[in-house]
Image: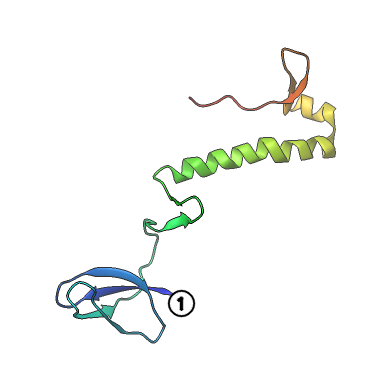
Amino acid sequence: MPKYHFICDSCKADIERYASIKTEESKCPTCSGTMKRQFPNIGSQVVKEVVDKFTNTKHTINQKAEDAERKQDHFWTVQVPRLVQEYGIQTCLEEKWLVYNDKGELVINKPPSKR
């Protein structure tokens, strides 16, 4: 079922709820008046719903930063090892995807943290 935007005629309550496509009116939970379905909004809205019910987390204000950090971490932990298998160690060393640490071990070169 799609989610629709309803506004009450009497108390002007503003509620979003799941409803059938044929549903034009609904009962207001605040004043028991008639709520009418509105046209769908174009564009994005702030997500107020629980995104992950298992961990009970929601979208945060820094969601874009968290997504960017997750993508960067995925690149260095998954994609770079695939590149080593595909291109070889010499190419990865030249591109500085891999470096030797202080102990002389070959490790993935993680970019410096932005703190």
Identify the residue shown where x is 18% and y is 71%: 12
Q: Nearer the viewer, residue 71 or 17?
A: 17
**Residue toward you, 111 or 107:** 107
- Residue 94, percent from left and from top: 77, 25
Q: Can you say whether 49 is above or below 99 in the image? A: below
Residue 109 % position (x, y): 69, 26
Describe the colour scheme in one phrase: rainbow
Compared to residue 33, the image places residue 79 above or below, namely above
In the displayed structure image, the side of residue 8 where residue 61 appears, left or right: right
Residue sitting at x 55%, y 38%: 69
Front residue of 24 and 111: 24
**Residue 37 position within the rendered picture, expressed as x and y whole percent measured from the top left:** 30, 78
Q: Position of residue 88 (x, y in %)?
A: 85, 33
The quadrant holding residue 87 is top right
Apparent side of residue 30 relative to residue 17 in the rendered image (left or right): left
Label 1 CA crowd tier, 10 Å (few <14, some 14–19, many 20+): few
The residue type indicated by label 1 comes to: Met
Residue that sits furthest to the top in the current view? 102
- What is the residue that sits farthest to the left in this orientation? 10
Most extreme residue toward the bottom, as rendered? 22
Which residue bears the numbered disc 1? 1
**Residue 26 sits above or below residue 103 on the image:** below
